[in-house]
Image: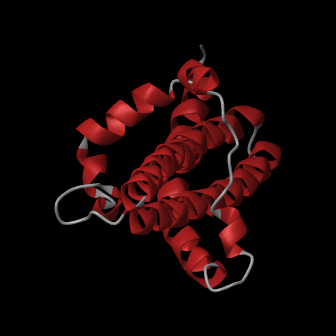
């Protein structure tokens, strides 16, 4: 690999990480505006990948391990089920907020990656996009997977509660 290619790979990835981190804030701001709209409820049922097999193939379980076992676990503590946080519907709502914020960030950084692919080169833009996938798309897919698990738990609890009332 020549020196220029290596430079584009490293600088593109580092730039992508930086822009992705900034996109989190922009995503939160835009999402707070969207959350007040009537159609926002429809966003809470997004499911890009419903297949657990495909989730395994793309390495989502490894990504989940990284989130759970690195400082990323401290980023959004409202998404954890525990003694202080037992309301499944509230946790699910927080997951929807996180998922949608990451999707907004993903779209914004994707536009940046396309721009830099054209102006600076395909290698640079591709590595911006790689960082974007890791920092925005995978967190969003993980939230979708977690929401499906929460939905199953909510359904089970509703069935148990219905059976005890009878």
Q: Where 153 sits versus 13, above or below? A: below
Please name whichever residue, 95 or 81, is drawn nearer the observer in this view of the structure.
Answer: 81
Count of marks overlaid on the render:
0
Position of residue 32 measured from the top left corner of the image (x, y, whole percent): 56, 80
Quadrant housing residue 138: top right
The quadrant of the rendering that contains the C terminus is bottom left
For the point 28% across and 60% down, the residue is 77
Q: Nearer the viewer, residue 88 or 34?
A: 88
> In the image, residue 52 lies at what x, y percent?
58, 26
- The N terminus: image quadrant: top right
Residue extending farthest to the right is 118
According to the image, what is the colour scheme of the structure?
A: secondary structure
Q: Is residue 112 above or below residue 132?
A: below
Q: Residue at x 62, y 84 (%)?
A: 33
Q: Name which residue lies at 68% across and 46% down.
A: 47
Vertical position of residue 38 compared to residue 142: above or below: below
Give the x, y percent position of residue 42.
72, 66
Q: Residue at x 49, y 61 (%)?
A: 98
Quadrant for residue 91, please give it: bottom left
Residue 13 lies, in percent from the top left, at: 53, 39
Q: Nearer the viewer, residue 60 or 18?
A: 60
Residue at the extreme front: 166
User: Outermost residue, top direction?
Assistant: 1
Which of the pair 138/82 is nearer the observer?
82
Q: Is residue 75 left or right of residue 57?
A: left
């Amino acid at each position: 690999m020549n020196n220029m290619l290596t430079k584009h790979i490293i600088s593109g990835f580092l730039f992508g990480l930086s822009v992705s981190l900034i996109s989190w804030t922009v995503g939160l701001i835009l999402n707070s505006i969207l959350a007040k709209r009537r159609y926002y409820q429809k966003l809470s049922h997004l499911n890009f990948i419903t297949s657990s097999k495909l989730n395994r193939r793309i390495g989502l379980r490894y990504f989940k391990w990284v989130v759970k076992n690195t400082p990323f676990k401290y980023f959004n503590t409202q998404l954890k089920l525990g003694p202080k946080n037992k309301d499944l519907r509230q946790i699910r709502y927080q997951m929807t907020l996180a998922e949608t914020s990451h999707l907004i960030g993903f779209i914004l950084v994707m536009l940046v990656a396309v721009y830099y692919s054209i102006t600076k080169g395909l290698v640079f833009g591709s590595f911006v996009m790689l960082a974007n996938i890791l920092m925005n798309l995978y967190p969003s897919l993980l939230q979708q997977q977690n929401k499906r698990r929460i939905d199953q738990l909510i359904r089970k609890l509703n069935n148990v509660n219905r059976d005890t009332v009878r």
